[in-house]
Image: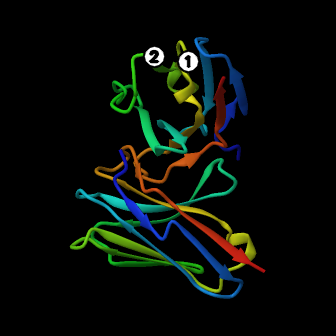
């Protein structure tokens, strides 16, 4: 079946602009995660959605970052007023109910000029 | 912040040799997983070992876990050029929870 998909694959933006990154999880997966991978910080957790529960936002680095998950499926990560340090690969993952394995999408490579 | 530290950071071996990498973590865990990443994009799950397990095998992969030392190792036997990738350990504190990743080991398998 289809895996986790993310769009766009690559995004180049200018400092100060807003960007939206999209994640389509595997159908039936109740948990959805966003991570960021950058040269200096490695792989970092950003935010986690589980079913209808309130999301765990503890990894969001600033209030410029926000995420939504509509209808328990698609998720959008929004970065407002982008900064150069936001340049990274943003990875989305999903997992089925009661399972720990996470299935990752190919990521969105964001470059802020 | 990084929970785990991995060593070595990079490893270069010949095809057919074994590759061993280690991961250490700082806090108690529910389970520990290993993932592979090719070309800096999506991660692929390799194997999961629970906190009450000490060793696990999957094909050419062998994982050990020592909770007293807060460490794990991943052994890839009879390596192939296709095993060239970065390998990450990841831990979680509860089932279905967020993962905390180590810094990764870059493995190069030369044909």
Residue located beneath label 1 in the image: A82
Which marked residue is nearer to the observer: mark 2 or mark 1? 1
Task: Judge whether B26 appears above or below A79 on screen.
Answer: below
Does residue A8 appear anywhere in the picture? no
Q: Is residue B17 left or right of residue A61?
A: right
Q: Is residue B47 left or right of residue B49?
A: right
Task: Judge whether A62 appears above or below B48 on screen.
Answer: above
Q: Nearer the viewer, residue B99 or A97?
A: B99
Q: Nearer the viewer, residue A98 or B66?
A: B66
Q: Position of residue B60 (x, y in %)?
A: 59, 81
Q: Nearer the viewer, residue B13 or A84?
A: A84
Q: Is residue B89 left or right of residue B43?
A: left
Residue located beneath label 2 in the image: A64
Q: Position of residue A35 (x, y in %)?
A: 49, 38
Q: Which residue sits at x=38%, y=61%?
A: B5
Tell me whether circle 2 and circle 1 mark residues in contact (CB < 8 Å): yes
Q: Chain of mark 1?
A: A
Q: Quadrant of residue A81?
A: top right
- In the rendered structure, which disc, 2 or 1, sits on the residue that comes first in sequence? 2
Secondary structure found at label 1: loop
């Amino acid at each position: 079946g289809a895996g986790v998909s993310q769009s766009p694959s690559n995004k180049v933006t200018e400092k100060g602009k807003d960007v939206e990154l999209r994640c389509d999880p595997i159908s039936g997966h109740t948990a959805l995660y966003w991570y960021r991978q950058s040269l200096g910080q490695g792989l970092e957790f950003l935010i986690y959605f589980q079913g209808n529960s309130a999301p765990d936002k503890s990894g969001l680095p600033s209030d410029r970052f926000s995420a939504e998950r509509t209808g328990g499926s698609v998720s959008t990560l929004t970065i407002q007023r982008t900064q150069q340090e936001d340049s990274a690969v943003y990875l989305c993952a999903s997992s089925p109910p009661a399972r720990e394995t996470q299935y990752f999408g190919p990521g969105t490579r964001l470059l802020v000029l | 912040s990084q929970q785990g530290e991995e060593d070595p950071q990079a490893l270069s071996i010949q095809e057919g040799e074994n590759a061993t990498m280690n991961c250490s973590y700082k806090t108690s865990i529910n389970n520990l997983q290993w993932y592979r990443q090719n070309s800096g994009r999506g991660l692929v799950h390799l194997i999961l070992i629970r906190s009450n397990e000490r060793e696990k095998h999957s094909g050419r992969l062998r994982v050990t876990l020592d909770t007293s030392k807060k460490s794990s190792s991943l052994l890839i036997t009879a390596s192939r050029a296709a095993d060239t990738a970065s390998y990450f350990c990841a831990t979680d504190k509860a089932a279905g929870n967020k993962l905390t990743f180590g810094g990764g080991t870059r493995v190069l398998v030369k044909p």
